[in-house]
Image (cartoon, helix red, strand yellow):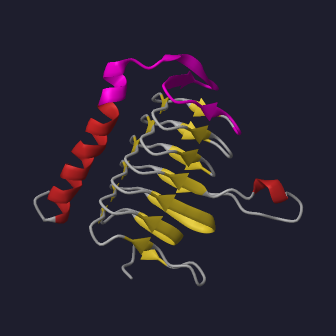
C-alpha cells in the first residue's frame, strides 16, 4: 500500500481498479471505493472506528473529510457507518460523519452532515448547510442553512444537473488517471 492508503488493524481499503484517488488524498482502514469513483486532492476517508462505503461514479471533491462513529457499551446507538451511494456529488470541503447519501444525491460545498443524517436519492444539501443528527433530506428537496431546514423543492433543471455533475467528474477523473491531468 502507498503512504496515503493505509490499513487500520486488519482492515485495508478496497479501491476499484478504475477509481481515481488523488496522490494527496488519505484513505485509511475499512473503506470501499466503487468503480469509476473519484477521491480528490486533500480528502481524508478514515475508516478506523466504522466503515465507509463509496459507490460507483461518485465524486468526493477536494478537502472533504469522511468518518463514521464508533460503538460502545455506554452509547451503543451511536455506532453508525458512512454510506455514500453511486453517482453522488460531494462538493469541496464537505464533512460527512456517520451518515447516508443515497444514489444520485448531492452535497454542496462546505456542507456538513452529522450522525444519522440521511439524504435520499435526488435530495440536495446546499453549500454551507449543517444537517443535524437524524435529519432526513427527502427526494426532490433542497435543504439549506445552519441548522439546515427544507428551503424548497428542487427545480427540474437542478435535478437534471445531478447526473451531469457525476458524469463530468467521472470524465475528469479518467483524464487524471490516464496521466492527462
Residue 93 location (% of width, % of height): 44, 43
Residue lying at 19% horizontally and 64% vertically, measured from the top left? 177
Assign the C terminus to one quadrant of the image.
bottom left
Give 1 or 157, whichever is nearer the viewer.
Answer: 157
- Determine the image quadrant of residue 136: top right
The span picked out in magenta is: 133-160
Q: Image check: 177 left or right of 116? A: left
User: Which residue occupies the foreground of this view, 25 or 102?
Assistant: 102
Quadrant position of residue 158: top left
Using the rendered view, name the quadrant where residue 120 is placed: top right
Toward the top, the furthest residue is 152
Number of numbered tags placed on the structure image: 0
Residue 5: say if magenta: no
Residue 147 colored in magenta in the image: yes
Q: Position of residue 149 (x, y in %)?
A: 61, 21
Q: Position of residue 172 (x, y in %)?
A: 20, 50
Residue sitting at 41 percent across and 49 percent down?
A: 63
Q: Residue at x 47, y 51 (%)?
A: 85
Tell me: residue 69, above or below residue 29: above
The extreme right residue here reads 74
Depicted 134 relative to depicted 142: above or below: below
Q: Is residue 58 left or right of residue 174?
A: right
Q: What residue is at 64 percent from the left and 26 percent from the top?
A: 147
Quarter of the picture containing the N terminus is: bottom left
Residue 164 in percent (x, y) is at 26, 37
When the figure is inspected, residue 79 is found, relative to residue 139, above or below; the finding is: below
Amino acid at each position: 500500500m502507498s503512504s496515503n492508503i493505509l490499513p487500520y488493524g486488519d482492515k485495508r481499503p478496497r479501491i476499484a481498479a478504475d477509481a481515481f484517488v488523488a496522490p494527496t488524498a488519505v484513505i485509511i482502514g475499512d473503506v470501499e471505493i466503487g468503480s469509476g469513483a473519484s477521491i480528490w486532492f486533500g480528502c481524508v476517508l478514515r475508516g478506523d472506528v466504522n466503515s465507509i462505503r463509496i459507490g460507483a461514479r461518485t465524486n468526493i471533491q477536494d478537502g472533504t473529510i469522511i468518518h463514521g462513529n464508533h460503538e460502545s457499551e455506554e452509547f451503543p446507538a451511536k455506532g453508525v457507518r458512512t454510506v455514500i451511494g453511486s453517482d453522488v456529488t460531494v462538493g469541496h470541503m464537505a464533512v460527512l460523519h456517520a451518515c447516508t447519501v443515497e444514489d444520485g444525491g448531492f452535497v454542496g460545498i462546505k456542507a456538513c452532515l452529522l450522525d444519522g443524517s440521511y439524504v435520499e436519492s435526488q435530495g440536495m444539501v446546499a453549500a454551507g448547510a449543517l444537517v443535524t443528527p437524524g435529519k432526513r433530506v427527502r427526494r426532490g428537496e433542497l435543504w439549506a442553512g445552519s441548522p439546515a431546514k427544507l428551503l424548497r423543492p428542487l427545480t427540474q433543471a437542478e435535478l437534471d444537473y445531478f447526473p451531469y455533475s457525476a458524469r463530468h467528474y467521472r470524465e475528469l477523473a479518467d483524464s487524471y488517471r490516464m496521466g492527462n491531468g
